[in-house]
Amino acid sequence: MRTSTSLRRKLISVAAVSAALFTAATTSVAVAQDSPTQEAAVPAAQTEAAPGTPAERLIVGYKSGAAEAKSNKAAEADAAAKGEEAGEDLDFQRRLGSGAALVDLGESLSRTDVADVVAEYRADPQVAYVVPDRLNKPLATPNDTEYSKQWDLFETTAGMNVPGAWDVATGSGVTVAVIDTGYVTHSDLGANIVAGYDFISDATVGNDGNGRDSNPADPGDWTAANECASGDPAYGSSWHGTHVAGTIAAVTNNGKGVAGIAYGAKVSPLRVLGKCGGYDSDIIDAITWASGGTVSGVPANANVAKVINMSLGGGGACSTATQSAINAAVNRGTTVVVAAGNSNANASGYSPASCANVISVAAADRQGNRSYYSNYGTVVDIAAPGGETNSVAANGILSTLNSGAQGPSAENYDYYQGTSMAAPHVAGLAALMKSANPALTPAQIESAIKTNSRALPGTCSGGCGAGLADAAKTVQAVSGSGGSTGGTTFTSTFAVSIPDNGSAIESPITVSGRSGNAPSALQVGVDITHTYRGDLVVDLVAPDGSTYRLKSASSSDSADNVIATYTVNAAGETANGTWKLRVQDTAAQDTGRVNSWKLTF
């Protein structure tokens, strides 16, 4: 008989991960030795809930014509059959809001065991994808009260120039879903909180005595020593979601506390992170529900969000399961803003930072440099204030919090640092934009934020997207008060096959009717289907033959497809002429095609 696994999950400590993010430390974790054949067949990233930790659940997406895509009974039977083939006891758990199936693998499986199960699913032609149900973490660590301390909103050097936007919009009429640790009562935020939901399905992770329910209250995410992983110290509760929510929509002009960026907006708290972290499957359902999709067993959302903020993340490139949920949310008209991550590493190796159709946000310090902990790279879209508290606490981001070391106690304010703090700046800006111009699409919001950004006053090694977000300029632009909403787009929809381990192919776009040079933030949108995107090298070729590297090959990037928007400084290139997207597959066994690509001037 199968025993309950709910109390025996080997989760990884949120606090431990947060600490690691700010020391750039790496921890060695023993992993079961795999045979070379298995390693080649199923990469480690496809079998782990977190680096070094074998997955205990899988997310399985079936093709639309498969019986398992429509029938829970069929999906349950398929799980049992796959388990029998792999020699494991598998349980179908539930259907996610995206339509995928959540399958429990049982306890104490090695990576080899998980790989065997993954291989069984991958061999089934009716399976569209199978990915681990990965753990995600809040991307900040803690570190008090009045507007004058909120340098991130108004300081000339590296503030986001928010006061100039308030003359145009305050976020009125917009709901922002904060997918995070939930909400702890705070008098400087409560008037702007609307109903949310607790999506944590595991009672142990939830730490509130039950599974999913309509109460997103944050009971605290403290951990005892060794509770989540051997060697972990004890950590106090973070109240992370409340800090994020305060940055977005703290009550303003009330004679106390801090000001919210979109203080006329409402925040719907969706709880997905608890003790030791949170699973992709719960986050996927929260994304689906927040944007107006249907999740089995959860009542319809009366507060559909036009903006989602996810200040969370985990190791590994964006999975197909998470990408599918994000794509569906964006197609419903919801802008998705995510933290780039705090590992001082390329954000392409983190999720949801590397997902397409999101606004991925790096963190800047008070001087306008990339914060020492912030992730970077071509998947990053924009930078925003994230602060640094390592030397001076007041150089962090001040927001609403709670003083409880474990459960809730007295409300307070405190300084935090992190891309977790940078992302809600951009989510707040997106809410201001949507309030100023309700017709804006997610793509237009992203484009306008990039186009109207300003150069970082400091340095950003590795790449911080288009620059530092500028609220006043951006909101004025989309409201018709000035600025640029993104310019003209030229698109190629002619599909071109990419030969396996072969010569580079090129897809042309002829640009005409432009004057002068291309912009310093030329947007290159790419839609490439490929079964192992780490094989691909992608370049933009200017009319004069100059090349700009968009994506390099990487043996650790095992996800499918390249669906992304890259920012290129092409100010030295004449705009008119024939531009080309050059793609080369540099390794064997996987094929693909360029479906379409576009240039936005």
Image (tube, helix red, strand yellow):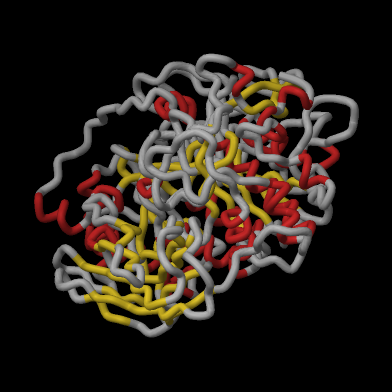
Left or right of 105: which side holds 400? right
Q: Nearer the viewer, residue 515 or 558?
A: 515
Left or right of 194: which side holds 466? left
- Residue 508 vertical placement versus 55 (above, below): below
Q: Nearer the viewer, residue 395 or 281?
A: 395
- Residue 405 vertical placement versus 422 (above, below): above
Left or right of 146: which side holds 522? left
* Residue 303 appears in the figure: yes
* Residue 95 appears in the figure: no
- Residue 329 vertical placement versus 397 (above, below): below
Residue 92 position, x and y percent, is 43, 59
- Residue 152 vertical placement versus 513 (above, below): above
Residue 474 position, x and y percent, is 68, 53
Image point (77%, 64%), residue name: 438
Q: Nearer the viewer, residue 24 or 483?
A: 483
Image point (84%, 47%), residue name: 167
Residue 468 position, x and y percent, is 57, 43
Q: Name the quadrant containing residue 443.
A: bottom right
Left or right of 43: which side holds 481? right
Residue 335 position, x and y percent, is 62, 58
